[in-house]
Amino acid sequence: MEGIRPGVVAVSKGYGHWAFGSSDVVVDGVVIKGDSSRATGIHINPIFRLDDNLRGTPLSEPIGGSASFYDTWVTLQKV
């Protein structure tokens, strides 16, 4: 894709997650059925590089303190 340097992997962070709304929940004794199709999304949080000194906490960038999105190395394998 134009604008992405060769050797760089880009993943949209907004392509979903695997839990919100996918399981049944009970609110005031009433079961609200989950939607299993919501459990099919992907999210990049599990692949973030972790800080060995902070017991598995993702690295954070020093200025804003948010997760460091740009410091995770990946290896791609064709399947």
Image (tube, rainbow, N blue to C red):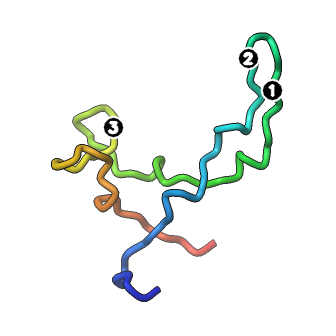
Count residues near mark 3 (Cα–Cα under 10 Å), then give few for <14, some for 14-19, many for 20+.
few
Q: Are marks 1 and 2 in contact (CB under 8 Å)?
A: yes
Q: CA distance from mark 1 to mark 3?
A: 33 Å
- Assign a secondary structure to mark 1: strand
Q: Position of residue 19 (x, y in %)?
A: 65, 39
- For marks 1 and 2, give the CA distance: 7 Å
Element type where label 2 sits in the image: strand
Q: Is residue 11 above or below residue 14?
A: below
Q: Which mark is residue 32?
A: 1
Q: Look at the picture and state if 28 lies above or below 77.
A: above
What's under tag 2, amino acid-wise? Val
- In the rendered image, the residue lying farthest to the top is 29
Picture disc at residue 49: none
Residue type marked 1:
Ile
For the point 53% across and 57% down, the residue is 14
Determine the residue positioned at 83% across, 31% down.
33
